[in-house]
Image: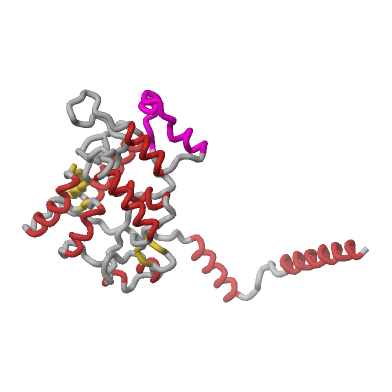
Amino acid sequence: MRKKRFTLLVMFTLLVTLIAGCSGGGTTTDPDAQKLAEDKKETAIEPVQEKQEPVVDLNGRAVRISNWWDASPKGDSEADERARERIKNVEEKYNVKISYLNTDYGSTSEKISSSVMANEPFAEIVRVPDGYIWGLMQGGFLTPLDDDLKETQIKPDVIDSMRFGTDKVYGLTGWYTPNDSGMFYNKRIFKEAGLKDPQQLLEEDNWNWDTMLDAAKKLTLDKNGDGKMDQYGLSGAYYVLHEMLIGSNGGKMYDEATQKAAFDSPESLEALNFLYSLYNDHKVVKANAGND
């Protein structure tokens, strides 16, 4: 019974509300109030004027983008086609000419410093290899962002995390994330060498630095006997390998809790020393010769 009474009470309340709403909707005899209502109606239906974006004309300025590979979209994929269309739209909208430079990895830092010193920068946008950032920063070729961030709404802890080497903020970022990177292996050469491939070792809970190094040694071969290695057990960039090794050893490069670099932790140092041994002691990593 209580439940039924409650339901009837709610229904009665709603009915009273509806009646009150309807009774208040009659026409008014007050001419001033009627005029005000009509003005409000006209204001409500008046179209909103969109703000016109200011026209920017850069007078055909060249915008050169430097990478250590040819990053220009070739148009041989859907993503490339979208990139080419985007470039075309930007060029037309701002009257610029965008091009890509393929700058040798090892000469990027030197080209930046020499061309800037000559007051003729070789590119407008340059992707800088990690290993050269410190030298460019110390040489005064990187501009701190502290003054630009004074009025920003960015949280202080985010700004502090962008500090690099000094008390200045440089806003550096990296492209590597552990979610979309990993190790790839050539199944064929593992099979030819009679080795278990990494997937098998992983399933046996036996994929670790030792088994990786053992495979890398056995897969680094001088096939024609000329004293030079024709096949290497490992390849890749050291600036990616060190991140993977540190992570796999339970280390970190940056400690969010203390907001400080953590390269000197025991786990990180062990990983860096192992990386050194792969290159210099075991010599199982293919040198970066500017090819695939």
Residue 202 magenta-drawn?
yes
Q: Quadrant of residue 132?
A: bottom left
Q: Is residue 203 highlighted in magenta?
A: yes
Give how far across and how far down residue 112 sits, in percent: 14, 54
Name the image quarter holding residue 270. bottom left
28 relative to 211, above or below: below
Start-end of magenta stretch: 184-204
Q: Is residue 254 above or below residue 95?
A: below
In this view, the residue in front, 113 or 209, is 209
How is this picture coloured?
Answer: secondary structure
Front residue of 71 and 255? 255
Name the image quarter holding residue 213.
Answer: top left
Q: Which residue shows up at 43% across the image and 31% down it?
A: 197
Q: Measured from the top left, where is residue 225 in percent x and y?
A: 20, 25
Name the foreground residue: 105 vs 249. 249
Q: Is residue 87 left or right of residue 201?
A: left
Residue at image x 28%, y 34%?
232
**Residue 151, horizontal then vertical, whole percent:** 33, 73
Task: Tell me: 262 left or right of 14.
Answer: left
Residue 30, percent from left and from top: 62, 76
Could you tell whether 234 is left or right of 111 in the image? Answer: right
Q: Is residue 23 left or right of residue 155?
A: right
Which quarter of the rendering shows the C terminus?
A: top left
For the image, the number of numbered tags is 0
**Residue farthest to the left, as pictured:** 118
User: Compared with residue 77, is residue 192 higher up or lower down, i.e. above or below?
Assistant: above
Which image quarter holds the N terminus?
Answer: bottom right
